[in-house]
Amino acid sequence: MSTTFPPRTLLLLAALAGGAALPAQASTILYSGFGDSTVGATAPAGWTRVANSGSASSTITADHHFSQNAPSNGQNTLSLFNTGSGISRAAGDGFRLTSTFSATSGSAQYENTAFFFMAPSDGANAPRVNFNMGYSNTGLLEFSNVTTNVNDTFGGTAYNALEPQNPIYTFTLTGIFQANGNLNLTATLANSVNSTVLTSTGTLNAASATGTYFGIRTAAGGEGSGHAASSVHRSYLLEAIPEPSSAMLLLGGAMATLARRRRRG
């Protein structure tokens, strides 16, 4: 009698046969890139621009990057993507977000690039990670609207030497649900100029981890008026992380079946 295993289990078996280590966590892609978006659109395909203040704007550029601009102090623009039921809240499950982007800010002002997660459909009071760039000559990776957080920063000479070189930033955010329903969070920010990596951590309690929207916001702020801020997102990858043990359960069942077949043979 033949036995059919799911493709995922076959891959795991093949990895073991070749002496490879098992992956700690497999993932499912919920959204990847902006390449299928219409040039000139105000939000990427599948996204909605839900907020736009003053003369702030957003657009898909000719090279299929996602550009957001806030020309003056206090202006911002926000676009959101609905993950629906794509992210499981089971213990050990969660998500991983990776994005590469560049940002600009001017003298005596700051640019805020914010990554929203587990947000409501209008983005109001949403959990997010802010990269506050240029404020008091620092780069601050800051959790907002979460239960607890420890934020990392680089400033002074280190920051002032970095910004003029127009770095490309790589941002990651990983959220893993715990048995009590709380979401453990780790955010990192690397850059293309030096080896500095910011790492911030946080916890979002279960009652607040109910939204299904993820997104990007750019905001400008500073002293007085006329402080432009902008960001250009080159990539955006959002993955759902299943429970690590699920792969092992599948593998365990497959190995037990193979063992029974060998004994019978």
Image (tube, grey):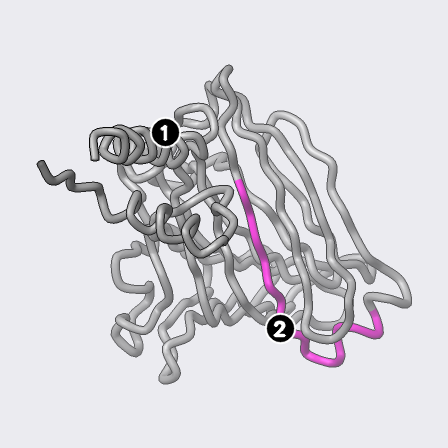
Q: Position of residue 193 (x, y in %)?
A: 74, 75
Q: Position of residue 125 (x, y in %)?
A: 49, 34
Distance Cα–Cα, label 2 vs label 1: 40 Å
Which residue corresponds to mark 2?
A: 168
The label on residue 249 is: 1
Q: Is residue 165 magenta?
A: yes
* Figure label count: 2
- Picture layout, residue 126 above or below residue 79: above
Q: Name the amino acid type tagged 2.
A: Ile
Residue occupying the point 47% across, 19% down: 181
Q: Position of residue 234 (x, y in %)?
A: 47, 72
Residue occupying the point 34% across, 52% down: 29
Residue at the outermost bottom position: 62
Residue occupying the point 82% across, 62% down: 137
Please state if 117 lies on the left or on the right of 186 as rendered. Answer: left
Please state if 126 lies on the left or on the right of 194 as rendered. Answer: left
Residue occupying the point 42% across, 58% down: 237
Quadrant assignment for the N terminus? top left
The label on residue 13 is: none
The secondary element bearing badge 1 is classed as helix
Q: Name the amino acid type tagged 1.
A: Leu
Few, some or many residues within 10 Å of mark 2 (<14, 14–19, 20+): some
Q: Which label's residue is closer to the chain start, 2 or 1?
A: 2
Report the span colored magenta.
160-174
Q: Nearer the viewer, residue 53 or 204?
A: 204
Residue at the outermost right position: 157
